Amino acid sequence: MTYPPGGQPPQQGPQYPQQQQPTEYPPPAGYPQAGYPPPPPGQQPSRKSKVGLIVGLIAVVLLALGGVVVLGAVLTAQGKGPLASDGKRIENAIHDFYDTLDNKGFQAAAAKACAADRAEFEALPEEQRQEFESATVAVNIDKIENIVITGDTATAHIIGKLTLEVPGQAPDTDTSTTEHLKKEDGKWKVCSAVTGKN
C-alpha cells in the first residue's frame, strides 16, 4: 500500500474536530458549564435568597415585638400589667372581691381579702360561718371613685347596689359604701380589718 506524500493514509468522509471529554463530573469550579461563562468573581447567585430570609426574620421579630407592646398596653389599661397604676389595681381588687362574693359566696371572697380578714373569717364559730354561707348577695358596682392611697392602705368610695339576704331576715341593701384596702405582697386586697370594724 502506497501512501501519499507525508506518510498519512487518506481520510474518508468529512472531518470534524475531536472534542476533549472532561475527566471529572461535575466540572471543577471555574470551568464553563453548558457553554456559559463562569459568574464574575465575588458574586454569588444565592445572596438574594439570604437577603430575603433576613428581611423575613426581621419582619417576624418586629411583629412579635408589636404584639408584646399592644398586649402590655391593654393589660396596663386594665390595671393588670406591670405598669398599671395603683388606682387601677385597687379598682380591679374591689371588682374581683365583689364579683367573687356575688358568684361564689363569703368563703371564696374571704380567700381574696387581706390576711387579717381571712384569719378573722377562719376564727368564726362554725355556726356563724354557716350563716354567712347560707346568705345570698347581689352586687352591682356602678362606680368606684375618690381613691385615696396612704402608703400600703387605701380607701375607695363605691356607688352601686349591694343586697344581702339572710334566711329569716329582711334584705339589707346599701347603695354606697367606703371600702378599705391593704397592699400585701404587692397586691391590693379588700381589708375591713384596717378600720377595726367588720
Image (cartoon, helix red, strand yellow):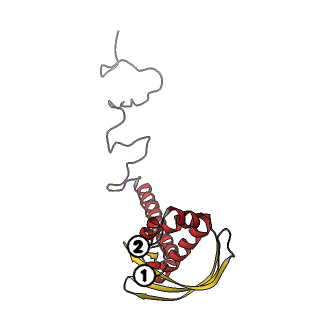
Between 178 and 94, which is closer to the camera in this rendering? 178
Q: Does the magenta stretch include residue 175?
A: no
Alpha carbon separation for disc pair 1 and 2:
9 Å
Residue marked by disc 2: 116
Give the amino acid at mark 2: Ala
Coordinates of residue 24 in the picture (x, y in percent): 33, 31
Q: Point out which mark residue 194 bears.
A: 1
Q: Does the magenta stretch include residue 38?
A: yes
Position of 195 with respect to 25 (left or right) is right
Position of 110 with respect to 142 (left or right) is left
Whether residue 172 is visible, yes or no, is yes
Q: Sequence order check: which comes first, mark 1 or mark 2?
A: 2
Give the amino acid at mark 1: Val
Coordinates of residue 105 in the picture (x, y in percent): 58, 65
Coordinates of residue 197 in the picture (x, y in percent): 47, 81
The answer to which image quadrant residue 83 occupies is bottom left
Q: Which quadrant would the N terminus be assigned to in this image?
A: top left
- Find numbered disc 1 in the image and state the secondary structure of the residue it sits on: helix
**Which residue lies at the image location 56% right of the left edge and 75% below the top edge?**
95
